[in-house]
Amino acid sequence: IFYMGINLGAFLCNLIAGTLGEKLGWRYGFWTAALAMIIGLVMFLALQKKYIAGIGNAPKKIKKDEQKEQNTPLTKSEIKKIAVIFILAFFSVFFWTAYEQSGASLNIFAYQYTQRNISFFGHSWEVPATWFQSLAPMYIILLAPLFSKLWLFLAKKGKDPSTPMKFVIGLWLLGIGYGFMVIASILLGPGVKIGMYFLGLTYLFHVLGELCLSPVGLSMVTKLSPARFVSLLMGVWFLSNALANKLAGTYSSYFGKIDNVYFFGGLLFAPLVAGFVLLLLKKTLNNWMNAK
């Protein structure tokens, strides 16, 4: 529910801010983003006492046994579980570095190299390039309930993949998604643009990979973290996302400077290799996750 909720906003923002930015001017697109955040802040301040009163507040007094627990050294089991968090956070960097091309190189590709004209009843209309960024959140809204049911169904059958294996699947699905961009780049030529379905398929496989990795990763951190370190280790998880966004921006700067086949080939190759290496570590990580 949480994941679908935030992606509803991600779906709408590109249709609103993106359209205004492309059609009227980017200042209007940025203003809508600023206005939406102001509205969100006002709603939070107005409704927090009614719906989330007390949530997130510091305890008035820490009990002696809780204080003792906070000062207790980590056990070997806890150390192994924390190590799993760091290792999977490292591999998630490979995922998000490639995934976060959506707002960079993939968006430029949509603008420059994609045939976006739709004709119907004698009228022609050009799909704004920014709209393609709404594909991923749309797929998530549609597929998240199915994935939730899938994991529950497999768990009942005793066939639910382990968390490391879900990461492997996520990385491989992401790499497959970039396979469509490699094909699209091969088909490009002087005056030739590719169909919108290439980006549609790319984003579909990216989302299939994301649903195997992102919500699973968030759940993994809360389950494996010692109670006193949940917030800290969740910060570590998001720090890996921050690093990935930095690397994504750095890598996207090479778009247009090197051949598109090689550019997207790197985004195909890296997740596949990372997934294979993680597959080799899967057994060890599973043992550490279940350490007593």
Image (cartoon, rainbow, N blue to C red):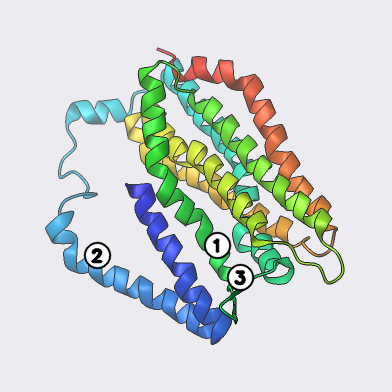
Instruction: Give the number of the disc on residue 44.
Output: 2
Q: Outermost residue toward the bottom? A: 24
Name the spot of residue 55 as percent of width and height, x first.
Answer: 20, 49
Q: Outermost residue toward the left? A: 50
Residue type at numbered disc 1 = Gln
Q: Quadrant of residue 226?
A: top left
Within 10 angstroms of label 1, few (less than 14), some, or many (20 or more) residues? many
Name the spot of residue 112 as percent of width and height, x first.
Answer: 73, 71
Question: Image point 55% across, 40% down: which residue?
Answer: 209
Within 10 angstroms of label 3, few (less than 14), some, or many (20 or more) residues? many
Name the spot of residue 275 as percent of width and height, x first.
Answer: 65, 31
**Mark 2 and mark 3: Cα distance apart in space:** 32 Å
Residue designated by label 3? 129
Residue 225 in view here: no
Q: Earlier in the sequence, mark 2 or mark 3?
A: 2
Q: Quadrant of residue 176?
A: top right
**Mark 1 and mark 3: Cα distance apart in space:** 8 Å
Residue 196 in view here: yes
Quick one: 8 or 32, which is closer to the camera?
8
As helix, strand or loop, the secondary structure at mark 2 comes to helix
Residue type at numbered disc 2 = Phe
Q: State if disc 3 and disc 1 touch (CB < 8 Å).
A: no
Quick one: 99 or 117, which is closer to the camera?
117
Q: Quadrant of residue 257?
A: bottom right
Residue designated by label 1? 133
Residue type at numbered disc 3 = Ala
